[in-house]
Amino acid sequence: MGNFIKTQTSFANGEVSPNFFTNSNINGLSRLENMDVIPGGGLRRRPGLKKIAKLSANARLVPFSISETEHYVLAIMNGLVRIFAGDSFVQDVFAPWSDAAVGLLQYAQRFGTMIFVHPDYSPKILYRDNGVFKFMNFSFTSADGGENVDMPFMRFEDSNNISITITMVDNTAHLNTNQDFWTVQNVDGHLSLLGKTWLITSYIGPREVTAACNGVFTIPNSPITDWQEAVFSPRRGWPTSITFHQNRLVFGGSKSWPGGVWMSHVGEHKNFNTGTGLDDEAVYFTLLSSRRQHICTLVSSDNLQILTSEGEWAVSSKPLTPESVNIKMHTTIGCVADRYLPPQEIDGSTIFVSNNKRDIRQMVLDDLGQNYRADNLCALAEHIMNNPIDIAYNKTDKKLFVVMSNGEMAVLNRNAELEISGWGHYITAGEFKSVAVSNGYTYVVTERDSEFMFERFDDSKMVDADEYSYTSRACGLPIMTSGHNAKYIRIKKIVARVHDSKTLFINNFRTAFPNEVYVDGAPGFSGDMSVNVLGTLCDMVDSPWEISTSDELPLTVLSITIYGRYQI
């Protein structure tokens, strides 16, 4: 038998996978629940949740900041967007998206407007008119006196052998094809034909539709083989992803062309006419590789980052022009495609969820600034991620929040300067459904007793939604003592050094704080709290200690010390 004293003064690595339980170089925990890793490496009970409003249905939260003083949170539901300014309700706006579609919505903000895209819905713009929020359709500009619409056109593969013959019937143009081609979904779609833009107005049959032309045209004597369809239409689908980059509006992917990238004119965000290829004109390219590329999302960083289901690309051209598209596939991790999990920016790197839904990846340039790598932020906690459904980063608190399908929230406390990168779990009565950060505050949607609530984390709250208590818990790693692979240990005493605290359980034993800390307005106790557990036997694969509390009181733990004996 040998005596030992084991002190842990940092918990900077948070909860770690059992694969690392015997790694003595890790400042981790076997469980971290409803506690945060704070600067310095200590642990603190998480904030409670303030109840703001009841929602009529499940919602996805989206931040919308118009100015330094105007910050909103959009709660997007089935056919409705409920808008909040901080904790106050502002307005309801009817929206076209079904509940099933909300998860794939992507968005990009420019000044006081926000553009939403979805592969099954035409793009919509949220704007404010005399203090009232409204939606309007996104529309491309027109040039040449209105004869042409400045939208992107292309020839799809299934139309390569299709020729069109124009006939006039009662002053209406009929477009006839040489084989079956048209569907009812072509109605309201556009064609580029005879150098002009045409709008399909009605479906007659698989070989015939009617159309209206924006200008004067002359019917040719032979069938037309040189024609193109609009890239975006009811039949071909709408943009999957969106961002602004180098003062261009960028669309990425669609149902019919999942690897395409379309960029507007510089400063003219509704003009996608490629023109003659001048530097400020529209840009179009397709991602090509040995595997089919499905663009999941776009990120405007130092470079334009394109995250696909198969890997991560970057366009490094500066400035980006039609003649200087320098594009490269850097990593082959892949991004989630069946739901939009908005990439987050942390300290200049892009954080995204990998397509296996088990990793949170950090896309960062190497030391030479030429190639990206995708580091796994869950490398030490590979067990913690379980099918993410939403993600947000609070740069004020330095916390990355990841809502998971099981209703828990994985939280990464990350401070690179202090070498803190620790995962933990947030658990509440009910389930977390969505998360967003606005103006430094973290908002969530929760489901409690079959009701959906809009809530906010609040440092002054010690319970959730004014009534639901929660347990904060941290469990230590199995002990390696004196470099020996001991059989078991007998613990004599456990000491927790606390700061400004009023509650603490050690191994389920309540510790006694001085009575004066419970006087209203009195500060908490700072110092050592201990329990004597003489003779407690612990094997080498279980946690030797647990600190916890369910009390509605503050708790901050700076270190844990164990006194005991070990058997080799």
Image: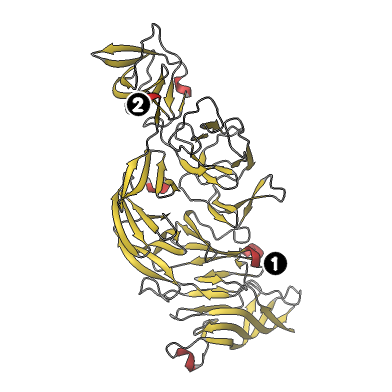
Q: What residue type is labelled 2?
A: Asn
155 to 502, vertically: above or below: above
User: Please, what is the three-letter code of the amino acid marked with disc 1?
Assistant: Asn
Q: Which residue lies furthest to the front in this view?
A: 145
Q: Name the residue under label 1.
A: 23
Tell me residue 324's x, y (percent): 62, 33
Quadrant location, the C terminus: bottom right
Q: Residue 186 carries which label?
A: 2
User: Where 556 falls versus 75 (above or below)?
Assistant: below
Q: Residue 431 location, x and y as percent?
A: 40, 63
Cα distance between the residues tagged 2 and 1: 62 Å
**Do we see residue 419 in this rendering?**
no
How many labels sit on residues? 2
Which of 46 and 8 lies nearest the eye of the viewer?
Answer: 46
Instruction: Name the residue at 36% across, 71% down.
Output: 465
User: Circle 2 sits in a helix, a strand or a loop, which is it?
Assistant: helix
The quarter holding residue 125 reads top left
* Residue with the most extreme top position: 221
Residue 205's image quarter? top left
Q: Which of marks 2 and 1 is in front?
A: 2
